[in-house]
Image (tube, rainbow, N blue to C red):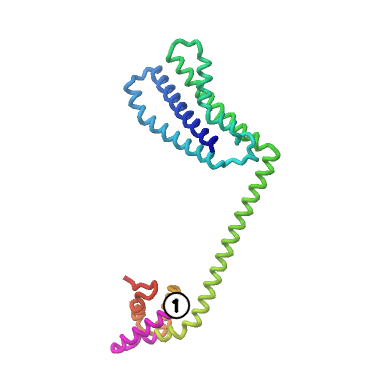
Amino acid sequence: MTEKRALRRIHLLSTVWFVACIGYILVSVLRDVGFNWWLIFSLSGPSALIILVLAGLYLFALYRGIGEAQQIEIEHPLTTTGYYMALYVAAPLLGGLAGTLGMVGMTEPTRFLLGVALGTLGTTFIIWVVIDPAAGMLEMLLPASRRHRLARLAQAEAERRARQEKRDRLLAEAFAREERELQQWQQELQTPARRLAALLTCDAGSVARAEQEAVDIGARAWRLGGLGCMRHLHDLTVRIHQERGSRQDAADYLSHWWDGIGDWHKPS
């Protein structure tokens, strides 16, 4: 834990130093080509914001890598060591040191600072862009790394297939269960559906009694299979009602009579 915290602090310091060196190089180049200070300062705000956003994203990615140990030591026996990670995160600082040593004897301050900044940029580029990818490729060529990677990928593929098979099995069981429920409802709801179809054709004086009986039938359907059973009974009743040649809009009485039973709600 202490090592990871130290690496994070070193990398934060290195990133700040790297951004400062890049900014100094940009300012020096703009001054050399004749840009005035007012133009440089006008560009510094948006440029600083972009640099800070990119640096923040990179720090977040590296912190996740260090904190969660995403690399596998067997496949990366070199780049996962503490010494290598220290070299990697301290690359800008080492570059600044190398640039300082290379500019020993330089008396002009601006050229001295430019040399230090260029040393930081060059060293960081070599370590981060050249050495690190090359070390990773060489690690993957090791027999132990290749065997472990192939075994890891095979295990991941097997786990993926197992999850897919489990999902397919659960889906098939759900479809089978739904089919059994539909068959059961089809048998048990024939008589209630016919009775409901008959209640829909009652005269005006029997509406209250018909509504009460329809509510009782809807409540039993709810207890049998919930909202799905009630919908099935409703559709079955509507079909029987239409087959008898009755008015189609009369079937909508069911939706109003069943309002409040379980999750059933009448249409707006």
Please tell me whether the stretch drawn in magenta is mainly helix, strand or loop. helix
**What crowding class fits label 1: few (fewer than 14 Cα within 10 Å), some (14-19), or many (20 or more)?**
few
Task: Residue 76: name its quadrant.
Answer: top right
Please state if 29 lies on the left or on the right of 86 as rendered: left
The one of 266 and 70 positioned closer to us in this rendering = 70
Amino acid type shown at disc 1? Arg
- Farthest front residue in view: 2
Report helix, strand or loop for mark 1.
Answer: helix
Image quarter of the N terminus: top right
Q: Is residue 226 magenta?
A: no
Residue at horizontal 51 percent and vertical 75 percent from the top: 181
116 above or below 186?
Answer: above
Residue carrying label 1: 223
Residue plotted at (51% across, 19% down) = 99
Instruction: Point out residue 75 in the picture as x, y percentages from the top left corner.
Output: 64, 40
In the rendered image, residue 168, in percent from the top left (x then y), is placed at 58, 62
How many tags in the picture? 1
Q: Which residues are magenta?
A: 197-220
Q: Nearer the viewer, residue 214 or 63?
A: 63
